[in-house]
Image (cartoon, helix red, strand yellow):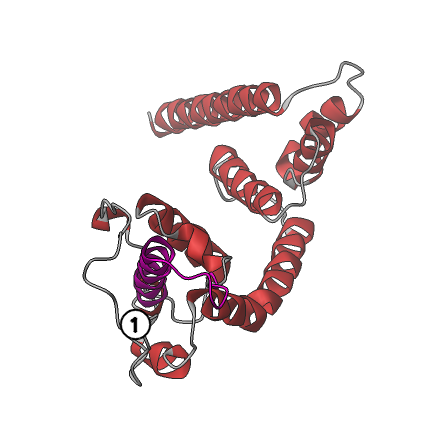
Amino acid sequence: MTGTPADGAPDVNPNALVPNIMANHAERPEKLSGLNFKRWKQRMLFYLTTLNLARFLIETAPVIVEGQADAQSVNAVDAWKHSEFLCRNYVLNGLTDALYNVYCKVATAKELWESLERKYKTEDVGTKKHVVAKFLEYKMVDSKSFMSQVQDLHVIIHDKNAEGMDLNESFQVASMVETLPPGLIDFKNYLKHKRKEMFVEELVVRLRIEEDNQMALKKGSEVESSKVNMVEAG
């Protein structure tokens, strides 16, 4: 078996069998600075998968039993070391310089991946608390378009679902109704007393129609006011 130099690069047998890796660098994720680890982790995992290297994040080095070594097993171990070295350095190159300096001495890709997860797993807890707070505190206002605010709420609900806190359809509809602004109090009461269960898409359509109706009424009122002013001036 071959040794490992001090710089961490494996002493690879040039005749070793190396897996065929099709590089797709267009999928390379942005460098991790310490924020949005969960998103970076998913993108890095996909990137390594396209390179056929993701398995080295969970595998440990194969061991040759003493006295049973042959050319084929030695070549297989050398090939594993080579691919594991690539995986480890792809992950390291996905870190900013500051983080690279911290983690560059970690021996294997598996240990590196586990170290990053231990360091940043608390971020997930903070993210969930932040998303829940945004959801509970969100209220629509009359000064902005209803539909733009519905879209904002959709984003918050999507973020909740992405964090593993799925909301069923009925709860989403009820929560959206509760956030409607004071100017829609009559419409809000109508929706709350509606017996037929609604889906989110249906509620969005109704809100769009209600917004169009209010805009039409406002425009009509402005036209009538303009006519009255013209008559009084005459």
- Point out the residue furthest to the front here: 67
The N terminus, quarter of image: bottom left
Can I make out residue 156 in this image? yes
Q: Main secondary structure of the magenta part?
A: helix
Name the foreground residue: 162 vs 216.
Answer: 162
Position of residue 146 measured from the top left corner of the image (x, y, whole percent): 52, 35
Can I make out residue 30 in this image? no
Position of residue 230 measured from the top left corner of the image (x, y, whole percent): 35, 26
Position of residue 137 measured from the top left corner of the image (x, y, whole percent): 67, 53
Span of residues in magenta: 62-89
Quarter where residue 87 is shown: bottom left
Q: In the figure, is residue 47 to the left or right of 124?
A: left
Residue type (three-letter) at the residue carrying disc 1: Pro
User: Is 85 part of what is drawn in magenta?
Assistant: yes
Quarter where residue 182 is shown: top right
The residue that mark 1 highlights is 10
User: Is 38 part of what is drawn in magenta?
Assistant: no
